[in-house]
Image: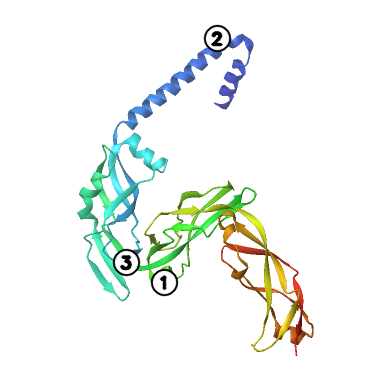
Amino acid sequence: MKDTLLAILSRLKRPIDGKLRNRFSVFLVCVAMSTLMWGMIKLTREYEAPVKFTIVPENLPDGKILVDNPDSVITLTLSAKGLDLYSRIIFNKENLLTISLAKIKLQRQEEDYSGILKTSGLIKVIAQQLPPGAKLISIEPDTLHFTFQKSFRKKIPVHPKLKLSFIRQYQLYDSLKLRPDSVWVSGVREIVDTIGFIDTERKVINSLSSNYSTRLSLETPQTRPGVKLSSDSVTITINVEKFTEADIEVPVSLSSGDKALSYRTFPDKVTLTCRVAMRDYKRLDPSLFTASVDYESARKSGSNRVPVEIKHKPSFTRVVRISPEKVEFLILK
């Protein structure tokens, strides 16, 4: 047989056998078409085959959370046309069945609550979710088991994952505003207690020069069993303002436990360079600042030249420079 095939192929390669080669090509096309037609006829017939479906529970009992579902995959024996039936098996289509647990009866076992559903009572529900033309023949297993625990609820802050950049002289005027700034997280207590914050989606915002608002999705922690969030997104507001630098002279005081102590500092004032928003520029006043040196620290160090500290300043400013950074002091007898 092998020698015969080799002989045929050898003859096909010869230029003088063009007629034979054409006949052989026609033969192959006919075989391919016949095979295709045979397959199409077969696929239009009815067949029975087992198909796996994933259970998607819904309408959980009030105040309970599903912690275990050992029968999350069931096998349905279906009767359907071969084309649809085997495409689900061969191409691994996602087969989902939604099952309501609203009427499941629970039995308490310490911290857990267990319940079962007989699949024989789910035939109508399952049949309604099957692909058109498919008939349900049998279901395995005959019983579905579910385990629940009490749902614990805790309010947890939202953490925005933002990267901001501003046009020159512009910056964030105050803290980011989140609405809501925290969400209720529901789930098993042991898991909820380990969650310190809820992240938003990551977002990069460039070249800010004006106020900006956007909505960010929340990232649900990947835990097992899972948790639920009271909201799936938050609105974030970014207040942007143009800033400038301003110099202001502030008197220097001596911080000491002895209020009767008489002293002098050299110089008696320092210049503070502050970064302030343009809207707050007129609010700057020396009385809003307190600059002092610590007497006890200077006495222990043995030096009368000590650094100046800013004890108080308005919240709308940031001190970027003190000039001079150190002053001398003299205790008057």
- Which amino acid type is marked by label 3? Phe
- Which mark is first along the chain, 1 or 2? 2
The quadrant in which residue 254 appears is bottom right
- Which mark is first along the chain, 1 or 3? 3
Give me the C-alpha separation between circle 2 and circle 3.
76 Å
Residue 103 placement (x, y as % from top left): 21, 60
| 192 with respect to 242 (left or right) | left
Residue 251 placement (x, y as % from top left): 68, 73
The quadrant in which residue 315 appears is bottom right
Which residue is depicted at the point 59% across and 69% down? Answer: 288
Task: Report which residue position mark 3 lands on.
Answer: 148
* In the image, residue 333 above or below residue 119: below
Image quarter of the N terminus: top right
Give me the C-alpha separation between circle 2 and circle 1.
81 Å
- Residue situated in front as seen by the camera: 1 or 157: 157
Q: Residue 19 shows which numbered tag? A: 2
Residue 286 placement (x, y as % from top left): 63, 68
Mark in the foreground, 3 or 1? 1
* In the image, residue 89 above or below residue 73: above
- Residue situated in front as seen by the camera: 293 or 197: 293
Residue 191 placement (x, y as % from top left): 43, 68
Image quarter of the C terminus: bottom right
Task: Report which residue position mark 1 lands on.
Answer: 190
Q: For the residue labelled by badge 1, is the local secondary structure a helix, a strand or a loop?
A: helix
- Which amino acid type is marked by label 1? Glu
Q: Mark 3 and mark 1 in contact? Answer it, CB < 8 Å.
A: no
